[in-house]
Amino acid sequence: MRHGKDGYKLRRDPAHRRALLRNLAASVVEKNRVTTTLAKAKAVQPIVEKMVTLGKSGTLADKRRALAYFFKRQTVQRLFDEVAPRFMDRSGGYTRIIHGEFRKGDGAEMAIIEFVDYQYTPKEKKKKEKKSGKA
């Protein structure tokens, strides 16, 4: 029987899937915004939401639970010091998924997962200076 076996399989064995989701959740916490496939974004969203909820309480036990999930201490530090305090007045819904275009190589539907308070600022392009041919 398959009791308690719901969720996205992502065509990976359980160990690979767990490592993928741990890395993706860490990337969302570290960078505030990640571009990935729609299925992966939908699979990682509940994990990130639960980690932010852990970060909001801020107890030592919750820090240890987050450290058992994430690979790096810096990620846990950022979660508890920077990310979670931004959402103290919210009771849930910390992330959003924005549907994107289809990937050119295999046609997979792409999506962006980001925190709801993320403000997009485009990077300024560097201007290349033209070198004169005379030396």
Image: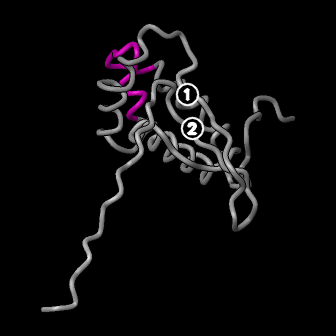
Which disc, if any, is residue 95?
A: 1
Q: Secondary structure at mark 2?
A: strand
x, y percent for residue 60 = 31, 19
Residue shown at 60% from the left, 37% from the top: 44
Check contact, mark 2 vs mark 1: CB within 8 A: yes
In the image, residue 13 above or below residue 129: above
What's under tag 1, amino acid-wise?
Thr
Query: What number of labels is visible?
Result: 2
Viewer-proximal residue among 34 and 49: 34
x, y percent for residue 72 = 34, 43
Q: Is residue 127 left or right of residue 89?
A: left
- Identify the residue under disc 2: 113
Q: Which residues are magenta?
A: 54-67
Real-space Cα distance between discs 2 and 1? 7 Å
In magenta segment, residue 47? no
Viewer-proximal residue among 57 and 84: 84
Viewer-proximal residue among 32 and 69: 32
Residue 29: quarter of image: top left
Residue 95: quarter of image: top right
What's under tag 2, amino acid-wise?
Ile
